[in-house]
Structure formats: structure tokens, C-alpha cells
Amino acid sequence: MTKDRDDDETPKTGKRHTAKGRLRRMAKIGGVLTGAGTRLAAEKLAGFLLSDDKRERLRRKIKQENARSLTRAMGDLKGVAMKLGQSLSMAPSAISEEFAHAFIELHSDAPPMDYATLAAQVERAYDLPLDQLFRYFDPEPLGAASIGQVHRAELFDGRKVAVKVQYPGVMDSVDSDLKNLSTILRLVHGFTDSEVRRQYLAEVRRMMLREGDYIVEAETMREFHERMTDWPGVRIPRPFDDLVRPQAFVMELCEGVKIDRKLASLPIGPERNRLALQWCRLLFDMFFNLQLLHTDPHPGNVLCDEGGDLVLLDFGSARRFDEEFTDSFLLLVYFQMQEEWDKLKVPYRRLGFRFPESSLGGEALRRLHEIVLEPFVKDIEFDFASWRLRSRLSPVYKRYPSLFQLVPPSNILFTLRVFASLRGIFQQFRIRANLYREMLERIEKRDIPQKAERWLKENDD
């Protein structure tokens, strides 16, 4: 019906060929290691014969080849390997530049399970035949990603539902994949710091295990549904508690058009800008008001329904924060708005960033934030299509190399992923929006100017 998802499973039973699956993954990782080792050996040999300038160019070329090779393997292996690359692409100061560029290319699309494997997985989860669970079950998935896929179905009482089903054995490789990928990144100098590598991999592991437990995801979905049920312009599906299992669960069917397709259908101008701003406000309100964030911003997880409401899907990687953490983001923006650059270290410290106190000065942070925070600190309808973030940051980092030592904490990875995705959507669809006023509204609501005085005093103490 559809092509097989992987060699790890059989069409008839859905059971993994455990040995074959592990050998396949080991072969992928082994190929990367062999290629990297060969290239590194060639680099050392050629280093004796080359000038300093040519040796540096060769070193960069080899790093780029290693990064591309590892990225291809991550994409093929899916699961934790892909999630790791996607997450690390949001922390360019913590990984080598070549790897940061390569990991951006990772996507979360995956070929779906064949129907026999799918049916076996559902029946194993509920210990019932598929035709006793549902009056109708659509064999074609509504969506397929790195851990599981979703299908349209109908219960015997007539309720239209969506069924999320996890790929067989996909979570079995979490620890082995992380161990292997950590070894590769260490050998090819993918990270700038060994302790940062350990912390980031631990965070990715924690989020992967959480995302792989559908009971936890259903509980998170219910929390979002209950806390946002009265919010205008947004809908959250409701899980059916009696049909929630660790590797499959049933939820209310909410339909609509993926937000990127909806934006593409609108002409450049006010209506498209309004929809994009609606999405942005939703993320801001979740993060700054609820201290709760949907951290998988793939456009397929945000729909626009017939009434113009936004529908949020897939709550596996949602994250909770404390007020101090989310307020510290607003404090960062507030100090930049007030041009108090010498105080910018305070919110960075409260957020948990690592940086050298003596070498990271206010001028370096001022130049960094003039670019990174530009849409939030200028009271204008900002044109995101003209925001050349990466090209403008490059000379700033070269002039102030201490900025490379501004390393984000591991718990911020998935937050950065959300806002980087939002930036990408705004740029792709040429959105114009005044985010200064959106930030100012939340700074005032959270009483940030008064909190700033107290936090500065605490910092001096």
C-alpha cells in the first residue's frame, strides 16, 4: 500500500528484526567514522607539506565533508539521530560552524509504515483487532515524521478521531544512537566544549524519551486544552483517556490547512501578515503568560481551520518553564530597548548562559543585539524578508570572538528552535509586523521594569 518504513520491521507482523536493525544502524555510523578517520589521516599527512593558509583551508574542507556525511546518516536513521541534529542546529555557538550549517538541512519528514506493520502496531497497543477498535480506519496517514504517524479514523459511536501510532522499536535505539553520535562529534571536533556536549546530549535524550511516551504526550495535550480552552483564535484537540497507550493514542480530529500552505495561498500584504502575527502572538502568550511552550514548530503541527482559528498538534516535545526563566527573556529585550548594554549580562546569567565575565563586554553584546533583537526593539513594521541575520552576524563574531564563548544552556535548545522556525516562516513569506509593540505589551504585563531594579540589586549583592 505504501513503501516500507525501514528494514527494522516486517510487513506481516510489524516486529523488528532486532539484529538486522542494529547492524544497519551500526553500518551507517561506522561508515561515517571510517570516512572521517580517512579524511583526518589525510589532513595530518598533507599538513606537513602545506603552508599555514592552505592547511587551514584543507581543515575547513574536511570538517565540511565530515558534517555533510554525518547529516546524511542522521537523516537516514531518523529517530533520535535526526532530532539531535535539528536541536543542535539551534545552538551555533556550541558546535563548530561547519556542523551548524549542515544540521540546518535536516528535515523531519519520514516514509510511512506499510499498512500491515501499522495494523500490527495498533493491535499490539490495544490488544484488540483493528476492526473491533474502529468502525473506519484510513490506511493513508495524515502525517508521518521521525517517531510516529497519524491516521484518520471513526469510532463506533460516530465520533471522528485521529490516531497517533509509534513506529515499532523506534525508541530502542535512543541510548546507542546518542552514544555513537557523541563519539563521532567528539572525534571530528563537532562541539566547542566537552561539557557542553555532555549537557546537550543529555537534554536531547530527556526530550526524546518524553516524546516517545504517548501517555505523557496525551497528558500534556490535555493540559494545553484545558488551559487554553477560552483563548480566542486557537483550538487544541482533546485526547480520549480510555484510548491512550504508551505507543498509540486517540484524540479529537481537528482539521485544517497547514499554516505554511495557508500563508502561501494568501497574497503578500495585510491578510498574510495578520495570520503570521496571530501565530507569533500565540507562541508569545504560551511562553510569557503560561510558561508553557509547544516546542516542535514544524508547519505540519500548526493548522488553520475554516473559521480562521489556529489548531496546534503534536505535544510530545512541549516544555514547561518557571517565571524567572521566561521573564529573563523579556529583561534582555527591555535592556536593549533602553540601550542599557552594560546590564545585558544580568539576564544572560539568569538564563544560565556560560560566558567569560572579563572578556564579554557591553559593546560586544550591543553589536550582537542590534542584529539579533532588531525586530523587537524598533517601533516599526519590520520587513523580515530583508533581515539578513547570518551574513550580518559573521563580521560581528569575527570582531568580537568572545561572543563564541556565549554558550546557551541545554534547556534553552528547544526554545531557540521555536523562535528560529518562526523567523524562517516570517522570512520565507515576506512578513511585515511590528513585534516591538508585542514585546512592550508583555514587558509591561509582566512588570519587567520593576523586576529589573530588584534583579540588578540582587546581582550587585
Image: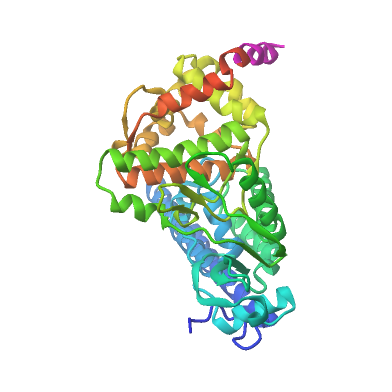
Name, please, the residue furthest toward the bottom.
12
- The answer to which image quadrant residue 337 occupies is top left
The answer to which of 390 and 308 lies nearer the viewer is 308
- Where 457 falls versus 300 (above or below)? above
Left or right relative to 393: residue 113: right
Span highlighted in magenta in the image? 452-461
Q: Who's the residue at 43% across and 33% down the image?
A: 397
Q: Where is residue 297 in the image (x, y as percent from the top left)?
A: 50, 50
Callout count? 0
- Where 379 falls versus 250 (above or below)? above
Name, please, the residue furthest toward the front.
157
State the scheme by which the image is colored: rainbow
- The answer to which image quadrant residue 319 occupies is top right
Question: Quick one: quadrant of the C terminus?
Answer: top right
Query: Is residue 210 shown in magenta?
Result: no
Q: Can residue 201 be seen in this view?
A: no
Q: Position of residue 115 (x, y in %)?
A: 55, 82
Q: Who's the residue at 44% across and 43% down the image?
A: 422
Q: Position of residue 107 (x, y in %)?
A: 46, 60
Query: Is residue 455 shown in magenta?
Result: yes
Magenta stretch mostly in which secondary structure? helix
Q: Who's the residue at 37% across and 33% down the image?
A: 395
Q: Where is residue 360 in the image (x, y as percent from the top left)?
A: 54, 24
- Where 409 falls versus 107 (above or below)? above
Q: Who's the residue at 64% across and 30% down the image?
A: 325
Q: Can residue 275 be seen in this view?
A: yes
